[in-house]
Image: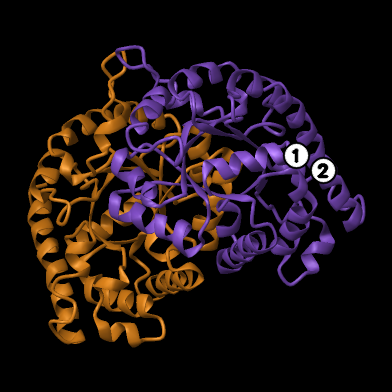
Chain colours: A orange, B purple
């Protein structure tokens, strides 16, 4: 998907919400477990409930791989369903891949050819030749880890070099030589607050994929105040806050789907207000 | 597998060879493609030919995932075959995973429970909570990226901080607080030559997984001179150099298997000489 198309979706839906599809079988309603493909059945319910309020879906591969072949089939069926029923939604595979060139080439084939997704999260530690193979696809996106939402982000990402440059800044600066604003986004955790100002100094025009609103404690308000740009430039992800809106068996499936839709709509409405300020 | 068992294997076989199972369908003999499961059939041939000369196998997930469900079935069948027929071989999933805590927990379940492998390569960029979930399994190993074999390793891994510490050194130093010599190894590329001396200053006792001998140009001699320790402390990987010993259809399958065995034996014999110096 082109940047222009993504931006059009954001402004027509008044939403920059990305719904993370990180399905934990222990947390889904018991009745879903009776379905032949519980993960896919749950995802389908979530997707149908949230599609009007979001512009992107982000399945996290870990939550599919852990169930082996069955999990990967649920992943494939989920992708196929989104592409068929909601073809204007942007799909990000959250897989945090990155390896030597010939291996990254294989990962790129997997996610951009075999699954034909829009974007893939990539880890930068191995440098240029581990990232470039993903950038060879037209209208596909690398979402490079920059400053993540977790506590461990402080361990290495905030290491200052001799010139006072943080590692995450170096990742932003160097990677701008490899890709551009039409094929590269960055992961910046919502928990990083005012650090978005520093990010915007180095990457003023790139889209940022922002996890960490909700369960991880990040503030949508702060993310927008310090990170939003003219054409929005943000995709804000919520996973647990939307997927598990109540105790799993405290209500019937229809009510559960309604609660999911409400949670997504709440976020969308906050986002609509932020977009109005532009 | 415990360190002691791995070391016993190394000294009884006089080998610290790890065979990388990075299967590229374009490179395997045409006759293999007629098999119902070409990747597994090829792997089985490679495993049977190399088992006497190596102590470990390292399937690279990228090369299975890129064929979707079929690829993952080939991965599972390969693992099952090694575990059944060659149960003393150490198996490393080369997947370079690493994510926020709850996601890394899912990856750990995948590789250490679902597949019950010995070790997994992990990327350090996201810090402590992205690595620790993998360390909660007894006799399982994290193989953390430190100084990789590719050109891009210079982009970030060799960044010096204000105290003159390289990023890869910081990864070694910090991660020693999370794991120890019985559950953590490091990836250090064979192409890094004398840098092994620096690695050994920070990680004098850890096992190192060393890719980059062969196709990538690293020297086994240098790796041993600067990286070998009392109980060996090295697993040296070769993939392409062993898997594709000749033009793919220049000979019959039996001859191909013989050539694979010869390549593995050559490396094993060089390794035997190195072990004798201890």
Nearer to the camera, A123 or B94 = B94
Q: Which residue position holds label 2?
A: B245
The residue at the point 46 percent across, 70 percent down is A76
Q: Within 10 Å of the Cα at label 2, are there few (<14), some (14-19), or many (20+) other Cα atoms? A: some
Give x and y (percent) for residue A173: 35, 27
Q: CA distance from mark 2 to mark 1?
A: 6 Å
Depth check: give the residue in front, B26 or B45: B45
**Residue A92 in view (yes/no):** no
Q: Helix, strand or loop at disc 2?
A: loop
Q: Which residue is mark 1?
A: B241
Instruction: Locate residue A205 relative to residue B4 in the image: left or right.
Output: left
In the figure, residue B129 lies in which quadrant?
top left
Q: What is the x, y in percent for residue A89? A: 33, 64
Residues at marks 2 and 1 on the same chain:
yes
Label 1: chain?
A: B
Q: Position of residue B229 (x, y in %)?
A: 58, 24
Instruction: Examine the rendered structure and indicate whether residue B12 appears above or below residue A61.
Output: above
Say if residue A114 shows up in the picture: yes
**Residue shown at the point (34%, 80%) measured from the top left:** A41
Chain ID of residue with mark 2: B
Q: Mark 1 falls on what kind of element?
A: helix
- Return the residue nearer the eye: B86 or A170: B86
Does residue A180 lie above or below A80 as drawn?
A: above
């Amino acid at each position: 998907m082109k940047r222009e198309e993504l931006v059009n979706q954001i402004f027509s839906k008044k939403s920059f919400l990305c719904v993370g599809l990180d399905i934990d079988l222990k947390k889904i309603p018991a009745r879903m477990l009776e379905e032949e493909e519980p993960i896919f059945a749950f995802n389908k319910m979530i997707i149908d409930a949230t599609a009007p309020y979001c512009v992107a879906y982000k399945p996290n591969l870990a939550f599919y791989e852990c169930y082996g072949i069955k999990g990967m089939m649920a992943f494939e069926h989920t992708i196929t369903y989104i592409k068929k029923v909601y073809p204007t939604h942007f799909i990000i595979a959250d897989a945090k891949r990155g390896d030597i060139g010939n291996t990254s080439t294989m990962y790129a084939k997997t996610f951009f050819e075999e699954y034909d997704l829009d974007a893939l999260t990539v880890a930068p530690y191995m440098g240029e030749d581990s990232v470039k193979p993903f950038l060879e696809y037209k209208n596909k996106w690398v979402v490079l880890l920059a400053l993540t939402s977790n506590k461990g982000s402080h361990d290495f990402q905030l290491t200052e070099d001799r010139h006072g440059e943080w590692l995450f800044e170096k990742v932003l600066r160097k990677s701008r030589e490899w890709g551009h604003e039409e094929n590269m986004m960055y992961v910046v955790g919502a928990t990083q607050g005012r650090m978005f100002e520093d990010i915007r100094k180095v990457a003023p025009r790139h889209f940022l994929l922002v996890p960490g609103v909700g369960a991880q404690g990040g503030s949508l308000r702060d993310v927008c105040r310090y990170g939003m740009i003219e054409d929005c430039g943000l995709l804000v992800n919520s996973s647990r806050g939307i997927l598990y809106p109540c105790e799993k068996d405290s209500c019937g499936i229809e009510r559960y789907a309604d609660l999911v839709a409400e949670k997504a709509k709440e976020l969308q409405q906050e986002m609509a207000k932020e977009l109005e300020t532009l």
